[in-house]
């Protein structure tokens, strides 16, 4: 057995479940702040 049965048999593991959401929330919060950067190497590739 494993998976969800292990999670619910040990209630201490339920405290770590919200920690798995932290990277997802950080990704969603910083998604709109990304900038596009023109790299000179790509400019030379596209010109040729």
Image: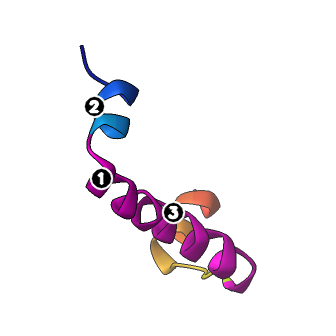
Mark 2–mark 3 CB contact (< 8 Å) = no
Mark 3 — residue?
A: 21
Residue at which label 1 appears = 13
Q: How many marks?
A: 3
Q: Which numbered disc, 1 or 2, marks the residue that appears first in the sequence?
A: 2
Give the mark, 3 or 1, whose residue is nearer the N terminus: 1
Task: Say if residue 47 shows up in the picture.
Answer: yes
| Image x and y of residue 48, in percent | 57, 56
Let me know if residue 11 is in the magenta part.
yes
* Label of residue 6 in the image: 2
- Residue 15, position as x, y percentages in the image: 37, 63
Q: Is residue 27 above or below residue 12?
A: below
**Numbered range of the magenta stretch:** 10-33
For the point 67% across and 79% down, which residue is it? 29
Instruction: Write the residue at 45% across / 71% down.
Output: 41
Asked whether 12 or 42 is in front, the reply is: 12
Q: CA distance from mark 2 to mark 3?
A: 19 Å
Kind of element beneath mark 1 = helix
Given contact means CB atoms under 8 Å apart, are the residues at marks 1 and 2 in contact? Answer: yes
Label 1: few (<14), some (14–19) or many (≥20) C-alpha neighbours in 10 Å: few
Q: Is residue 29 magenta?
A: yes
- Nearer to the camera, 11 or 15: 11
Q: Residue 1 appears at what percent x and percent y?
A: 24, 13
Separation (CA) of disc 1 from disc 2:
9 Å
């Amino acid at each position: 057995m494993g998976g969800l049965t292990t999670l619910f048999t040990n209630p201490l593991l339920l405290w770590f479940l919200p920690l798995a959401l932290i990277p997802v929330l950080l990704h969603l919060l910083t998604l709109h702040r990304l900038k596009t950067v023109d790299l000179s190497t790509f400019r030379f590739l596209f010109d040729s």
